[in-house]
């Protein structure tokens, strides 16, 4: 059984002081589940080193929210995979719908970021998901298939996590029902099995993101195919994130 993965994506929120205070408090809230749940925090770049120091002595891991694919050079404003490793990250989120939408990241750019990150031994949380229009037009699987095929071109499976994040559920308070999430997760799993074979394909965790809250976490995590969650809004308050980490009902 894979360890469930619970990731806090803070997006453009929190100063260094807020980061330190959050992590100090979180440590005391999650003592009982630290061994059985993998907890990852993705603060903004400016808080990563503070978070690295604050998480020392705990099992909390660090993720960046973005990365560039080149390792060094004249790329003003960018951050490389090795810089993220240097500052204590073991994960990076790639292909989030906000990066696709507001920063024009294409499947090709995402693919380069994934390959470069994995090469530097960063685990990648690769986000995919359909928009409301695409869902209404019955194109959900077609979109997932394209994002998977293009994003994972020549990508090896080690260190890979897939986050299914329907765009219409992100920040909207509209969560996918457990049935909708399960259906998409099963499609993704089948795709991974056909690309990577049974052992490697099954080894990749598939997690859900989109309006996850303390209220809906138990029913989502009760689904066999949901192996963790990526949490935005509800990860900003330590009490609500701690409740999510302490979800109930997993049949391990
Ligand atoms: P949300 O964000 O939980 O606020 O919907 C999830 C995400 O964007 O990863």
Image (cartoon, rainbow, N blue to C red):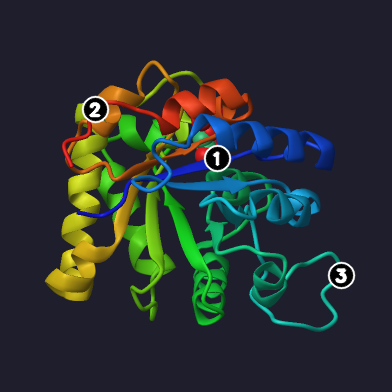
Labels 2 & 1 near each other (Cβ < 8 A): no
Q: Is mark 2 within 8 Å of ligand 1?
A: no
Task: Report crowding for label 1: few under 14, some 14 to 19, many 20 or more residues within 10 A (C-alpha).
Answer: many
Residue displayed at 48% across by 66% down:
123
Q: Marks 3 and 2: which is nearer the front?
A: 2
What's the CA distance linking mark 2 and mark 1?
20 Å
Residue at the (56%, 50%) spot, across then down: 58
Which element carries disc 3, helix, strand or loop?
Answer: loop
Q: Seen from this angle, which residue lies furthest top?
A: 215
Q: Distance between the residues labelled 1 and 3?
A: 27 Å
User: Which residue lies at the image location 64% right of the left edge and 50% below the top edge?
Assistant: 55
Name which of mark 3 and mark 2 comes first in the sequence. 3
Please report contact status of discs 1 and 3: CB closer than 8 Å, yes or no.
no
Dividing the picture into quadrants, the one containing residue 126 is bottom left
Q: Looking at the rendering, in which quadrant would you find the C terminus?
A: top left
Q: Which of marks 2 and 1 is nearer the N terminus?
A: 1
Above-or-below relation of 66 to 73: above
- Real-space CA distance between mark 3 and mark 2, rounded to the nearest whole angstrom: 42 Å
Ligand 1 closer than 8 Å to label 3 CB: no
Residue found 74% across the figure and 39% down from its top: 19
Pointer 2 residue: 178
Q: Which of marks 1 and 3 is in front?
A: 1
> Residue 79 at x, y = what percent?
75, 68
Residue with the mark numbered 1? 8
Looking at the image, can residue 177 be seen?
no
Which of the two residues, 205 or 32, is positioned nearer the viewer here?
32
């Amino acid at each position: 059984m894979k360890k469930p993965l619970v990731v806090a994506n803070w997006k453009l929120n929190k100063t260094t002081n807020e980061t330190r205070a959050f992590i100090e408090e979180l440590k005391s809230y999650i003592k009982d589940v630290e061994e059985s749940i993998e907890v990852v925090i993705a603060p903004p770049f400016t808080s990563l080193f503070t978070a690295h120091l604050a998480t020392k002595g705990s099992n909390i891991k660090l993720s960046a929210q973005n990365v560039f694919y080149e390792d060094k050079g004249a790329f003003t404003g960018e951050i490389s995979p090795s810089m993220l490793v240097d500052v204590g990250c073991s994960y990076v989120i790639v292909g989030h719908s906000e990066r696709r939408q507001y920063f024009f990241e294409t499947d090709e750019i995402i693919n380069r970021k994934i390959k470069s990150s994995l090469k530097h031994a960063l685990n990648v949380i690769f986000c995919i998901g359909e928009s409301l229009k695409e869902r209404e037009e019955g194109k959900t699987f077609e979109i997932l298939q394209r994002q998977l095929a293009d994003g994972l071109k020549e990508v090896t499976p080690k260190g890979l996590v897939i986050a299914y994040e329907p765009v219409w559920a992100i920040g909207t308070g509209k969560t996918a029902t457990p049935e909708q999430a399960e259906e998409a997760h099963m499609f993704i799993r089948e795709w991974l099995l056909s690309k990577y074979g049974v052992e490697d394909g099954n080894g990749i965790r598939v997690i859900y993101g989109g309006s996850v809250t303390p209220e809906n976490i138990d029913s989502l995590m009760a689904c066999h195919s949901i192996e963790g969650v990526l949490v935005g809004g509800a990860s900003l308050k330590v009490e609500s994130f701690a409740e999510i980490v302490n979800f109930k009902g997993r049949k391990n």
